[in-house]
Image (spheres, helix red, strand yellow):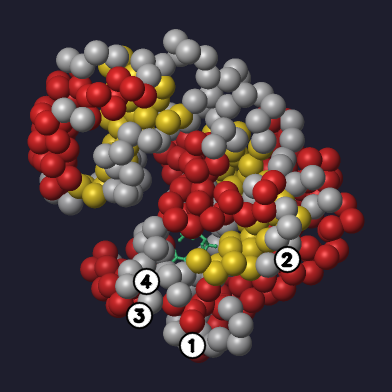
Amino acid sequence: MTDHQPGDGVTFINTFTLSAPPEEFEAAFALTSQFMARQPGFREHTLVRGTKDPTRYVNIARWDDTASLQRAVSQPEFQTHAAALRALSSSDPQLYAPVRTVRPAPEDAPVVVVTGGGTGIGRATAHAFAEQGARVLVVGRTESRLAETAEGHDGIGTVVADLTAPGAAEEVVDHALRTFGRIDVLVNNAAVSLHGGLADHTRKDDETQLATNLLAPISLTRAALDALEASGGTVVNVSTAGALGLRTWPGASVFGASKVALDFLTRTWAVELAPRGIRVVGLAPGVVNSGIGVRAGMSVEQYDGFLEQMGGKAPAGRVGTPAEIAWWITQLARDEAAYANGVVVPVDGGLSLT
Ligand SMILES: NC(=O)c1ccc[n+]([C@@H]2O[C@H](COP(=O)([O-])OP(=O)(O)OC[C@H]3O[C@@H](n4cnc5c(N)ncnc54)[C@H](OP(=O)(O)O)[C@@H]3O)[C@@H](O)[C@H]2O)c1
């Protein structure tokens, strides 16, 4: 893998989540495409439809340089095409800002392992690190989701693993070291949340949540210790603002307990691992529109209603986006953040203060 050189061209990624029939979106995209193909500096692009989620499209476009793309999107005709696409789809706030530049990461770039990197906050985190020049290994159980995360990103590798399986943690660390040679940041992000009262759940449900949210970060962090010591690395544990302080969480007691325990590990490991030069921090998101509710079994309508209700409760007046959480995760892992240790940072629009 080599660093970006002038002449390589620059790759841009736009993601779309459809709010209209695919044929309408594809027709509008084709018109945009014809316009783009006429612009100086345009090289090629590919529109990929999600395999698991057919309402999701990724556009991977290559241009000579950023300036060429910026000239193209500043033209009035592009605005017409963008408005048509916007009427048929939604996506992250950067959709029409051509800022998601992807370049091959150099061989000595830092290496970040992100668990649960095939969806939601994990995917946004993988992209945010990659956009900052890191090499990233995303881990999850579903190959197609991981592949979508890596699509168009030369610096993102994937490994399919069920982190609750015995030996999985060691395999993931071995894979990272064989592929990239080092680990600088471990983001323990994968989790399962099964909502329901104590009486609604079985022992199997409890075991699934505790194995994924608690035992998997323990095993993975333990397996990565030598590599993290060698790099002077950082562990970022993704918790939840719902479990901060002395809060209660009826309907999610086991999930909340797993995250309270994770926060305890964050604080304790920060002290225990400091002599080895390893820093441990936590990030506690509030309610984030990551699609987690739908993946946990809600209908789209139920999840939208939940997001609207929770957004109304937060002082910020809205729920968060995966990209907003990812930004904080990348910041906490930076060298400039080295004086923050053992802290769990809430990023929740102020919801946990209400
Ligand atoms: N979204 C929110 O409102 C919110 C709020 C507070 C905290 N959080 C926390 O933020 C983190 C990310 O959540 P999210 O919203 O992005 O949810 P999500 O999209 O459901 O992410 C969970 C990820 O974990 C992976 N995963 C689950 N079990 C696994 C296993 N056994 N082995 C490997 N990977 C596994 C899933 O992929 P596969 O199913 O393909 O394996 C999925 O990619 C979680 O720790 C969550 O608790 C989220």
Which mark sits nearer the N-terminus, 3 or 2?
3
Q: Position of residue 134 (x, y in %)?
A: 60, 35
Residues under labels 2 and 1: Cα distance? 27 Å
x then y, percent, for residue 225: 81, 50
Q: Which residue is mark 3?
A: 313
Q: Return the residue at label 4.
A: 316
Disc number placed over residue 153 in the picture, else none: none
Q: Amino acid at mark 1?
A: Pro
Q: Amino acid at mark 4?
A: Ala
First in sequence: mark 1 vs mark 4:
1
The residue shown at (15%, 22%) is 35
Residue at 29 percent across and 14 percent down: it is 41
Q: CA distance from mark 3 to mark 2?
A: 28 Å
N-terminal label among 2 and 1: 1
For the residues carrying marks 1 and 3, which lies nearer the camera in this image?
3
Residue 47, image quadrant? top left
Q: CA distance from mark 4 to mark 3?
A: 8 Å
Element class at badge 3: helix
- In the rendered structure, which amino acid carries the disc numbered 2? Gly
Ligand 1 lies under 8 Å from the Cβ of mark 2: no
Residue 311 lies left or right of residue 336; in this view the side is left
Is tag 1's residue or tag 3's residue first in the polypeptide sequence? Answer: 1
Q: Amino acid at mark 3?
A: Lys
| Badge 3: residue crowd in 10 Å (few <14, some 14–19, many ≥20) | some
Q: Is residue 222 visible?
A: yes
Q: Which residue, given by chain and number where applicable, does mark 2 sit on?
A: 342
Which secondary structure, mark 2? loop
